[in-house]
Image (tube, grey):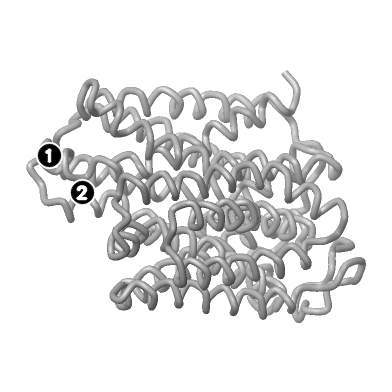
Amino acid sequence: MNRWMHLAGYALLIFSSQILWVTFSPITTDVAKDMNSSVGGIGTLTALFPIVYIVIALPAGRWLDSHFRMALTFGALTVGLGAAARLIFPFDYTWQLVIQIILAVGQPFVINSISVYASRYFPEKNRSLAISISSVSIFLGVIFAMVLSPLLYANGGLMNVLIVFTIPSVIGMLWVTYTLVSVPFSSKVIIGNVSTSLSLLIRDKFLWVLSGLLAIGLGVFNTLSTWLEPIFLQYGITGTLSGPLLALMLVSGIIGSMILPTWAIKKDLRRFVGIITFTIAATAFFAIAMWQSILWIAFWFVFVGFFLLPGFPIIVDWTEKHFPKSQQGTAVGFVMLASHAGGIILIYLVKAFLTPPYLALGIFAFVNILGILLAFQLPKPNKQTSLSMGVPNHKKM
């Protein structure tokens, strides 16, 4: 079995971690009745994931750097066994809350290992593609859960949803644990002092720039996913239309994630892509605030998704190239921590300005303008990163 087949198992594990996160989101009202809970209580089952991620991100990254196999095995077991455990008491809210917390703790170990997995199992020429495939699995998992949860619930209730979502989770767990036990790393990894590594990392300005860019990019998407319906409803666009518009953006982003990162990295145009991405996004939200035709919104959402979502694999790949193998998990953990924190802040900021809707859209545009300014701080093509303050350039950018 070659390395690409093993990557398929890891991608399935990432995919599963996302469907377990979003399981209850599209069926909140129905599940509240099944569990004799409030709608807010069911919403908590989903909302706690980014909160737990912020707490666990750095410890998970440091463990991945020092004990990669053990840390990723832990993440795989939480996904597979956690999914199966939900079947024991499917209608007990307290039980499901405990299991969701366990799953939320395991998720950073799975996601933070994207660059670490690529660097340890793939030669340098294949790592960008491996990171892109792993990243796409995140978005596919969200789409799968958002679309399939309501359909599965309508044709078998909550138990049907939990059973179907358990299958890929257990397969992904077994596949990844087999890989970790049986497949050797492609290269040796020198493990440094973890405390020293963290101290150096937080003094690296380049890492802060990458963190800020991801916080804006994913923050905009997550906030849009949260408030798209109430924003557009004020323009007379119902949820039956806002949902497909968001799905259109996500599909466009998946396509972009398979094309744009490899091209941008090969041509050394990551800085250019970053500037163009936030310019398009800022323009899109200004344009939508001025005119709310469905086709007009769909047109802009296709472009926003195509450019915005590929920012994740590009940033993860850049992190892998900038930092040595002994620091990659911690570095990605730091970037992910910042992106989740930024997303939560943006969610509550937009919530305060939902009415009138042009204020919310204006905030999206303004945040993307900040992204443009931040993207200009990225190193120019074919130059060593001049932003590094505490961490030396380990690889040519």
The amino acid pointed to by label 1 is: Met
Residue depicted at 43% across the width and 36% down the height = 79
Q: Which residue is mark 1?
A: 35
Residue depicted at 29% across the width and 42% down the height = 26
In this rendering, the answer to whether 262 lies above or below 62 is: above
Q: Percent x, y for residue 388?
A: 78, 77
Q: Percent x, y for residue 126?
A: 81, 39
Q: In the shown orientation, is residue 55 left or right of residue 40?
A: right
Mark 1 crowdedness (10 Å alpha carbons): few <14, some 14-19, many ≥20:
some
In the picture as drawn, the residue positioned furthest to the right comes out as: 382
Q: Percent x, y for residue 265?
A: 81, 54
Closer-to-camera residue (294/201) = 294
The answer to whether the residues at label 1 and label 2 have Cβ atoms under 8 Å apart is yes
In this rendering, the answer to whether 234 lies above or below 238 is: below
Task: Determine the secondary structure under disc 1.
Answer: loop
Residue depicted at 12% across the width and 36% down the height = 34
Q: Percent x, y for residue 258?
A: 69, 41
In this rendering, the answer to whether 99 lies above or below 357 is: above
In this rendering, the answer to whether 387 lies above or below 70 is: below
